[in-house]
Image (cartoon, rainbow, N blue to C red):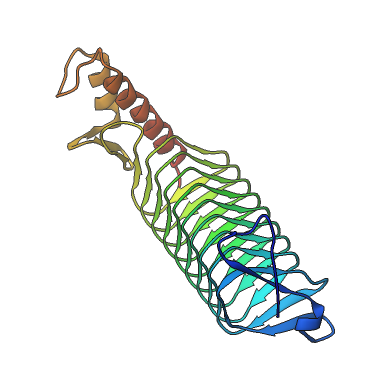
Amino acid sequence: MEEIVRAKMNKEKKTFYIRKKDCKNLGWAYEIEGKIYDGNLIIDVDKIIVVKGYQLVKGNQVVKCNQVVEGDQRVEGEQVVEGYQVVKGYQVVECDQVVKGYQRVEGNQVVEGEQVVECDQLVKGYQRVEGYQVVEGEQVVECDQVVKGYQRVEGNQVVKGYQRVEGEQVVEGYQRVEGDQVVEGYQRVEGDQLVKGKTILGMCKWRVTYYKTKITIGCETKTTQDWVEWFKSDAEYVTSRDSLAFNQIYKTFLMAKVAQENDEGLK
């Protein structure tokens, strides 16, 4: 294994560089054993790289080809994969992650920074992203999903558990969430939307939850029509009608009303 210095790597750590001569040639791919790298790692080969077993990188990682990891993977810095990525166990990336092809993770996935996937994404366990998330293709998460920044999915989205997005959410295809959904910012879904649990929208200081015929704002629940009449009146609870906070409550109510109308006719 050759150690080199790269300006884009963490200068406080050694950088390991994997080339063809460091790999077993399988014909269709190159193979390396999973191991612990006490520093940065650059993989630069002209075929798929297959990692046999667990891989731990204690710095940043750059993969200049397609990558298949047959065990778990942990990267303690940033990760950039210039092709597709398949991880057959769990994956933890402690900083930002960019994958320029499709991504499949067969276990749980935790990204403690921002995440950009430039094609489709499949995560077969739960997914947690601590920054924003952009998926430029379709996204399927087969368990719960938590995104602590904004989320943009440019294709269809399927989440088979609970979903929480703490910023804005834009889905440019259809969306199906099989558990409860919490979106704390603005939400736009350009295709059909099906949420099998309850939906909570949170652009204002109170949680706003909509059901088939009713909407809850904070601790108050009314039919949708009763809320329409209440907003037309001069009545108040604890928020003054001439405040910015009240205007945000009203706008969030309108979002919930539109979402409710879009669900009409769905089982």
Q: Position of residue 155 (x, y in %)?
A: 63, 49
Q: Position of residue 71 (x, y in %)?
A: 56, 81
* Count of numbered tags: 0
Residue 220, placed above or below residue 229: below
Residue 223, placed above or below residue 196: above
Quadrant position of residue 258: top left
In percent of the image, x 25 and y 33: which residue is there?
223
Pick the front one: 28 or 209: 28
Quadrant position of residue 254: top left
Q: Position of residue 150 (x, y in %)?
A: 48, 42
Is 242 left, or right, of 101 in this rendering?
left
In percent of the image, x 32 and y 23: which residue is there?
250
Q: Position of residue 18 (x, y in %)?
A: 73, 75
Pick the front one: 80 or 196: 80
Is 121 left, or right, of 45 in this rendering?
left
Q: Quadrant of the N terminus?
A: bottom right
Quadrant position of residue 239: top left
In percent of the image, x 47 and y 69: which residue is there?
108
In percent of the image, x 79 and y 72: which residue is there?
45
Is 197 left, or right, of 16 in this rendering?
left
